[in-house]
């Protein structure tokens, strides 16, 4: 596949290269001193003319040539041309022509001059100019040709250019060097004109001489009159001038006095204004100095005082903030402490309540028995408290005189009675409850510690008996539950 693709690619590249080269070679640019004439299949008309542009020339269908715009100078030595007066004249002249760049005239040049050399174009234009120049001379008189050259040149340019445009040329300039005739008519006209000019000049000279003499006499007369008049006017002018001088002096003196008065008054006014401005400047300076002194005192006294005040305020605010933060910290610490104590108390009370609930359950949910159990449990501590009541009594020495005989009260000796009385000084249990702000239950009032202990032992035995009775029941209930089980299950 690659073996066949390479030649195809090479052929495509060669084709593209040939197309590009053809395109660049067939794209023609027209310089400013030429006209590009495209002919062939141009889409209407015999040719397409381009000046100062470019065009693509299609190969096979189109071709191109250039027309040169370089001007051509043509010397026309016209001789024996017959004028309207049937007088033959020679009109040597020089014409400058070139190919026109106007759209319609360019097409004429492309149709009639394309392919011709400059010499052929020169000869063709010269023939046309000869014919038109003879035609113009034949329509004008010699006097008109000789005297009115502008009209002659305008007629020549109009007729010649109209014919040149038919072949695509344009008349650029016409220059007639000289006009002569064989009969000498133009020369005679020149001599006549010269003689007339000479006579006119002589007449003019004589008239000018006459006019000069008369003018000279009149000039002397006018001179004397004008001198006398001038003298009179001079004297009058002198007198008038003297009067004006005197008036001017008086006016000057008056104005000088007025100016002196005005200047003196102005000087005094200016002096007063100067003093006023000086006083005002001194007042401004004093005010400025006072302001400066006040500012200096303010900077020396008020500013430090304000700084001290702000320092004290900042220190007070800092101390107050410190006290507030310290108080807040102490309050938070107290709050945390109280919360911890409350939490601990709650835990203690919760545990105590749990213990009391267990004691009540152990007493068979009988509150009396539960109280007996609590008191029996605390009897050792209560006894300890009772003994503490007489513990600190200091007895340095006890002397008992006892004869060994009883006093009839159970045959107790005095020593036994003393010790028994001393033990009875221990506060009873009910009084201890009353001192503690508590009430001993009614069924324990008047009971001794031994009675209370005995009641508590009975409660314990009864509780244990209940537990013993309940245990076999639970075992029997378990056996019955097992016996009721269905074997199929």
Image: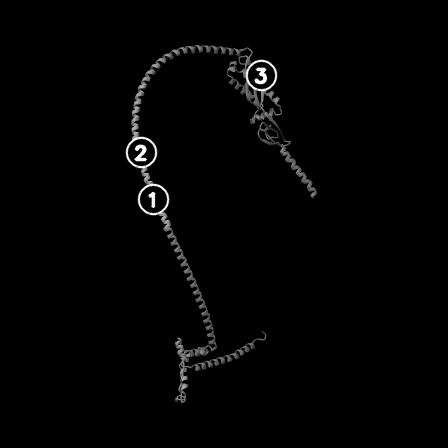
Q: Which residue is mark 1?
A: 287
What is the secondary structure assignment of the residue under circle 3? strand
Circle 2: is it few (<14), some (14-19), or many (20+) Cα within 10 Å?
few
Residue beneath disc 3: 77
Horizontal and vertical percent position of residue 443:
41, 80
Residue 138: x %, y % from top left: 54, 15
State the CA–CA distance, disc 3 to disc 2. 98 Å
Q: Earlier in the sequence, mark 1 or mark 2?
A: 2
Which label's residue is closer to the chain start, 1 or 3? Answer: 3
Which residue is label 2 attached to?
Answer: 267
Question: How many C-alpha atoms fall within 10 Å of the one at disc 3: few (<14), some, or many (≥20)?
Answer: few
Quarter of the image containing the C terminus?
A: bottom right
Q: Could you tell me which residue is drawn at 31 percent across and 21 percent down?
A: 242
Question: Which quarter of the picture shows residue 449?
Answer: bottom left
Q: Is residue 275 left or right of residue 188?
A: left
Q: Is residue 36 left or right of residue 313?
A: right
Residue 174 visible in the snapshot: yes
């Amino acid at each position: 596949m690659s073996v066949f693709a390479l030649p195809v690619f090479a052929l495509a590249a060669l084709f593209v290269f040939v197309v590009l080269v053809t395109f660049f070679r067939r794209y023609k640019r027209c310089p400013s001193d030429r006209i590009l004439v495209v002919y062939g299949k141009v889409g209407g008309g015999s040719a397409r003319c381009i000046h100062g542009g470019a065009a693509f020339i299609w190969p096979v269908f189109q071709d191109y040539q250039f027309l040169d715009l370089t001007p051509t100078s043509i010397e026309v030595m016209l001789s024996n041309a017959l004028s309207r007066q049937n007088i033959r004249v020679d009109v040597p002249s020089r014409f400058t022509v070139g190919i026109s760049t106007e759209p319609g005239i360019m097409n004429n040049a492309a149709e009639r001059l394309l392919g011709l050399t400059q010499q052929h174009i020169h000869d063709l234009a010269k023939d046309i100019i000869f014919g038109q120049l003879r035609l113009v001379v034949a329509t004008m008189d010699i006097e008109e040709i000789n005297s009115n050259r502008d009209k002659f040149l305008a007629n020549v340019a109009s007729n010649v250019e109209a014919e040149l445009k038919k072949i695509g040329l344009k008349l650029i300039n016409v220059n007639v060097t000289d006009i002569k005739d064989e009969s000498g008519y133009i020369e005679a006209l020149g001599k006549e004109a010269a003689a007339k000019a000479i006579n006119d000049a002589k007449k003019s000279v004589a008239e000018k001489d006459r006019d000069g003499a008369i003018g000279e006499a009149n000039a002397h007369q006018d001179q004397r009159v004008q001198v006398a008049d001038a003298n009179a006017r001079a004297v009058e002018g002198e007198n008038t001038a003297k009067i004006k001088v005197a008036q001017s002096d008086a006016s000057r003196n008056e104005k000088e006095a007025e100016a002196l008065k005005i200047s003196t008054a102005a000087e005094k006014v200016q002096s007063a204004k100067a003093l006023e401005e000086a006083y005002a400047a001194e007042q401004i300076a004093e005010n400025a100095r006072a302001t400066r002194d006040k500012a200096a005192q303010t900077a020396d006294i008020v500013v430090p005082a304000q700084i001290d005040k702000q320092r004290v305020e900042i220190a007070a605010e800092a101390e107050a903030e410190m006290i507030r933060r310290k108080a807040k910290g102490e309050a938070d610490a107290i709050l945390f402490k109280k919360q911890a104590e409350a939490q601990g108390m709650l835990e203690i009370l919760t545990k105590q309540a749990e213990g009391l609930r267990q004691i009540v359950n152990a007493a068979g949910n009988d509150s009396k028995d539960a109280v007996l159990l609590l008191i029996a449990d605390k009897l050792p501590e209560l006894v300890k408290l009772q003994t503490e009541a007489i513990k600190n009594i200091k007895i340095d020495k006890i002397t008992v005189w006892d004869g060994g005989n009883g006093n009839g009260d159970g045959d107790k000796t005095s020593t036994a009675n003393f010790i028994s009385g001393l033990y009875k000084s221990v506060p009873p249990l009910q009084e201890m409850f009353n001192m503690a702000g508590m009430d001993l239950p009614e069924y324990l009032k008047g009971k001794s510690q031994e009675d209370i202990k005995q009641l508590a032992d009975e409660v314990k035995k009864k509780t244990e008996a209940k537990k013993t009775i309940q245990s076999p029941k639970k075992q029997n209930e378990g056996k019955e539950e097992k016996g009721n089980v269905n074997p199929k299950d």
